Image (tube, helix red, strand yellow):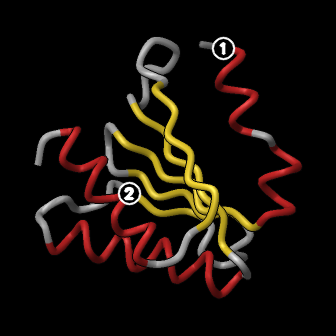
Amino acid sequence: MQDQQLKQFVLQQLEDMKAKDITVIDVSDSSDVTDTMIICTGNSKRHVRSVAEQTALAAKKEGESPLGIEGLEGSEWVLLDLGNIVVHVMQDETRQFYQLEKLWEQSA
């Protein structure tokens, strides 16, 4: 899958799983690790975990095996690494505390 197709696929998965406040940030000019960062919010630890796991499973079924997934144990913040796309699924309090959008927009 090409990057744009993968991005659309991931966004559709997040919407289907009822993730909230989905934000897409192009970090290609400021990161050597990834090109696109997608941040979204889950309602609870269980929801955060479910959104991340189901997105990872769906990507794998489409031939896009995740490079890694971190944070499932606590599920306050789960990072799903799909190579050129990194997905952050966070609880609302965690997202407000870390403010990744502001951090990456300032470095862009």
x%, y% of residue 5? Answer: 18, 47
Q: Is residue 77 left or right of residue 14?
A: right
Provide the secondary structure element on which disc 1 rests: helix
Q: For the residue carrying disc 2, how many other residues have a C-alpha within 10 Å: few (<14), some (14-19), or many (20+)?
A: many
Q: On the rendered structure, is 9 left or right of 92?
A: left
Q: Secondary structure at mark 2?
A: helix
Residue displayed at 22% across by 39% down: 4
- Amino acid, disc 1: Ser
| Residue 71 vertical placement versus 11 (above, below) | below
Q: Earlier in the sequence, mark 2 or mark 1?
A: 2
Amino acid of disc 2: Leu
Question: Left or right: where does residue 102 sit relative to residue 15?
Answer: right
Instruction: Choose between 50 and 15: the one closer to the eye.
Output: 15
Rendered location of residue 8, percent (x, y): 28, 51
Q: List x then y, in percent, for residue 21.
A: 63, 56
- Give the residue displayed 50% in from the left and 46% down from the top: 38
Residue 67, located in which quarter of the rendered image?
bottom left
On the image, numbered disc 2 is attached to which residue?
A: 11
Mark pair 2, 1: CA separation: 24 Å
Residue at 30% from the left image edge and 77% from the top image edge: 57
Instruction: Kindly report which numbered mark, 2 or 1, lies closer to the viewer in this rendering.
Output: 2
Residue on which disc 1 sits: 107
Q: Total marks drawn?
A: 2
Q: Residue at x 52, y 32 (%)?
A: 25
x%, y% of residue 98?
Answer: 82, 44
Name the quarter where the C terminus is drawn: top right
Residues at marks 2 and 1 touching, judged by CB atoms closer than 8 Å: no
Quarter of image, res 49: bottom right
Q: Residues within 10 Å of mark 1 (few under 14, many from 20)?
A: few
